[in-house]
Image (cartoon, rainbow, N blue to C red):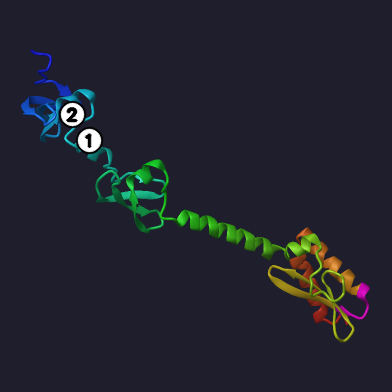
Amino acid sequence: MPSNDISGRKFNKLTAISRAGTDKNGCALWLCKCDCGNVIIVRSTDLRTGRRKSCGCLQKERYNIIGQRFGKLTVIGRESSGSHAKFLCRCDCGREIIVRGDSLRSGKTISCGCDKKSAAKIKQLEDRRKLQDHTSNVFFKGTISKNNTSGINGVSKLKNGKYRAYIGYKNKTYSLIEDYNINIAISARAEAEKAVKSGVFDDWILKIMEERKHGKNN
């Protein structure tokens, strides 16, 4: 068999059957049968170098990812072909989106976007929880509000001359006491701060409210 006769030889999924002439550049063409059953004509150089390995079905198999899972996405259908084939995917959250195959394989796209939204929502909830569980950053830093009228954090001077002690907790402001003596207001505020920091404010304020109801603070 001449060295240039490749009839019967197999190159990946293609088996050379018979010579089919030459192309415009003088390269030998061969009629080949693919393992899938298709018959195509291929240049001998493409067969020898491995540039052509199938009738095209190999690429289709490579991109046949229906049923596969990538992150939160499950591929349920094919939307387009080519080098940038797109697939219909269903996210764990129930939403369906179309994604490029290379984005799925590389891990660039792993959800419909809900994971990013979830992360943002979690951060928002965590930030809100910090504000609810305590007063605010002002409480811990001891910063004086610009609207403060007494110069003491958590104590304000009223128009009637009295001093009101107050504190914010769980997104609510509690009025603690009103008195003409600023030291009494400061003391009430200090007790409230201690209760917040020790984690017993709920019980502490309930006791204060009960005492106020029964007139013990008059």
Q: Position of residue 210 (x, y in %)?
A: 79, 76
Q: Position of residue 87 (x, y in %)?
A: 30, 50
For mark 2, does the 10 Å Cα neighbourhood hold few (<14), some (14 to 19), or many (20 or more) residues?
A: some
Q: In the displayed structure, would residue 39 be above or below residue 123?
A: above
- Which mark, by number, is residue 103? none
Q: Residue at x 80, y 81 (%)?
A: 213
Q: Nearer the viewer, residue 214 or 177?
A: 177
Horizontal arrangement in the rendering, residue 82 relative to residue 91 (left or right): left
Q: How many marks?
A: 2
The magenta segment: 178-183
- Which residue is disc 1 drawn over? 58
Horizontal arrangement in the rendering, residue 55 relative to residue 206 (left or right): left
Which amino acid type is shown beneath numbered disc 1? Leu
Q: Nearer the viewer, residue 41 or 155?
A: 41
Q: Secondary structure at mark 1?
A: helix
Q: Position of residue 179 (x, y in %)?
A: 89, 80
Q: Quadrant of the N terminus?
A: top left
Q: In the displayed structure, would residue 136 be above or below residue 119?
A: below
Contact (CB < 8 A) between labels 2 and 1?
yes
- Which residue is disc 2 drawn over? 13
